[in-house]
Image: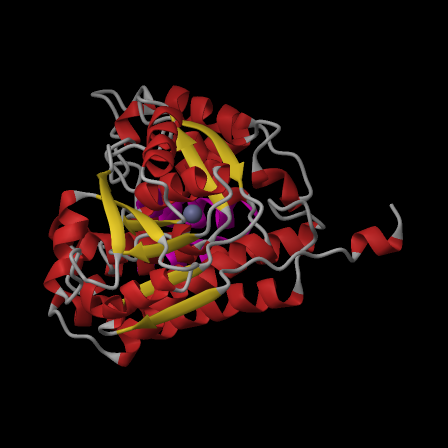
Amino acid sequence: MAETERRTATIAMPLRYRQGPGVIRELPDIVAGFGKSPRALLAATAGGLRRIEEHGFRLDDRRLRAELVEFGGECSEAEIERLKREAERAGADVVVGIGGGKLLDAAKSAAYRLNLPVVIVPTIAASDAPCSALSVIYDENGRVVKLETHPRNPDVVLVDTEIIVRAPIRYLAAGMGDALATAPEALACLRGGGRTILGAYPSRLGTAAAELCGRILAEDGVRAYRDAERGELTDAFERVVEANTLLSGIGFESGGLAAAHSLHDGLTELPECHGLLHGEKVGFCTAVQAVLLGEPDEAVRFLRFCREIRLPASLADIGLAAGPNGGGIRSRLLLAGERAIAPEETIHSVGRPFTAAEIADAFEETDRLARLVISPAERTEA
Ligand SMILES: [Zn+2]
């Protein structure tokens, strides 16, 4: 391979990222910036709309020419096409997505298929979906069908931390689970000579964003979780929201993914894991990646972190409980392992091949480590 190709990197991030308490009130002016008296299609859930209205956003704001469409709940091909038709019917100049990851992904896909700008308003900090030029498309049964990459990242990402801090705490923890994977995956991709999902090599900025994301979680993660439990909007909380949403986004897109997200995709093959959020699986899979790469001390550190913020930290926690004779799980893990090593998966950026059996072994070994490091008292408390 030519040296120049080796050096080719792509840095992807939103054009504008704004985070802080009360920023939702800027949304009408932001929308007004997209042309002369532009029309906006607002895609939201009823709950998402209520939450932003509680914090000062008015749908009947006279600065705003907007139509509301309620999200169907799944980021599926049918739902994206429906949003796209609604945007066309409304004559929208800009699409605004208000809510969680699946809604935001669907809004991005609908907007880019119409070549429209998109404004992203996350109401939870549960994943790094808001900033990326990527949508995860599911089928109606909740299985991942494909990743759709977009030509651009969102035009504006508006993160009102007064809204985020009032969301159920489970979402913040899931966002930290997703962000926990960012640094180890970016470093594995860099060391393995792998490419990012944009087909480029890791950029210095991407790797640095991933490392900063990991440092913030280590220093502020548990404190931010406890602050948010009490509804307190603190500096630690602000830093963790930025880590979950922006730094993790830049880290994975411009720094690279590796095994943890492929292991997660493997788990989406198992219906017993479908009740979990993306980041709840990714957090545990970060520990499994560490085992797979021969770093058990790191795996223990990740498992402890997951346990402290009440993320799943064992096979039973992710829905894989052993049958009466301890049987049944191995075949499930092999099924997940087959999916995790499929050609389109990011695990290959690690730079060495894995078998489904090695992946099943790593899941089992991670579960064994979890039993060693987590006391029975902690387990019953969780
Ligand atoms: Zn993720």
Q: Nearer the viewer, residue 23 or 382?
A: 23
Can see residue 374? no
Q: Position of residue 81 (x, y in %)?
A: 38, 28
For image coordinates 49% across by 44% down, the residue present is: 134
Q: Is residue 297 magenta?
A: yes
Question: Foreground: 271 or 108?
Answer: 108
Image position of 343 (left or right of 289):
right
| Range of magenta residues | 278-304
Q: Residue at x 48, y 53 (%)?
A: 296
Residue that lies at the very extreme toward the front in this rendered image: 36
Instruction: Name the magenta segment's main secondary structure.
Output: helix
Residue 219 seen in the current view = yes
What is the x, y in percent for residue 372? 32, 51
129, above or below 18, in the image: above
- Horizontal side of 377 relative to 2 (left or right) equals left
Q: Quadrant of residue 176?
A: bottom left
> Is residue 112 positioned above or below 321 on the image?
below
> Residue 95: horizontal and vertical position, in percent?
37, 48
Q: Is residue 308 above or below residue 98?
A: below
Q: Position of residue 110 (x, y in %)?
A: 41, 38
At 44% from the left and 53% from the top, the residue drawn is 299
